[in-house]
Amino acid sequence: GQQVQQSPASLVLQEGENAELQCNFSTSLNSMQWFYQRPGGSLVSLFYNPSGTKHSGRLTSTTVIKERRSSLHISSSQTTDSGTYLCALERGGSNYKLTFGKGTLLTVTP
Amino acid sequence: NSKVIQTPRYLVKGQGQKAKMRCIPEKGHPVVFWYQQNKNNEFKFLINFQNQEVLQQIDMTEKRFSAECPSNSPCSLEIQSSEAGDSALYLCASSHGFTGQLYFGEGSKLTVL
């Protein structure tokens, strides 16, 4: 089965609303990363967060290893936040390869 | 912002043609990865390097894929004989080391007609 599952698959928000994106994994974890992919392909690194909580502006990432989950919280969403959010884990024994989820497509409307 | 540079951004090839993509990793990053992202948003690890040496690669049993990271030259990924199923976004990423943030380039979108 899929080792990294992201939910929801898609999400539509009005500007100003908050978003909570989830990433659940079924294997051991060395590290967890969150990326934003712009329409057109470019991947932007948001967080490298193997455990605990990290903040960056309006974004917060929390990884709880024991519960095998990581979340990305976006507060006060803006139309420019629209795009695909991907989590990727490096699992134990993977020789450093990342396993990606299929992403959450976020659309923020004015 | 990432300083991984990939060229070309787009390439279109006929079946059986060679397709070559290049990547300049971020300065000071010894580790380079290539990933393939298909239209279903599925990522496939292809190969990784530390400095100029291949550390791991998928089982390229068809031997149609080859990659290198020579010193003082861009890294490259080449498909010897393109097939329709190779149409995808090819992403290069670099890192300080194996555990740490990956920084991706903008990708090379390959379309095989």
Image (tube, coloured by chain):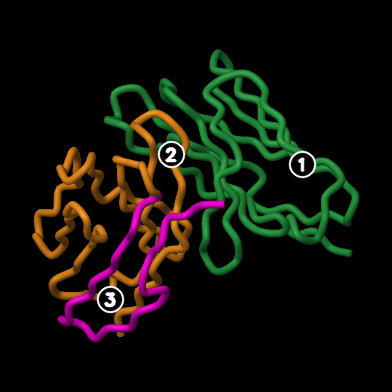
Chain colours: A green, B orange
Amino acid at circle 2: Gln
What residue is shown at x 61% (from left), y 55% (from top)? A84
What residue is shown at x 41% (from left), y 61% (from top)? B5
* Side (left or right) of A63 relative to A29: right
Q: Residue B84: which disc?
A: 3
Residue occupied by mark 2: A2
* Side (left or right) of A13 relative to B32: right
Question: Is B75 rendered above or below residue A69?
Answer: below
Q: Quadrant of residue A58?
A: top right
- Same chain letter for marks 1 and 3: no
Question: Is B110 rendered above or below residue A31?
Answer: below
Q: Quadrant of residue A90?
A: top left
Q: What is the chain identity of the residue bearing mark 3?
A: B
What residue is shown at x 36% (from left), y 42% (from top)? B28
Q: Secondary structure at mark 1?
A: strand
Number of numbered discs on residues: 3
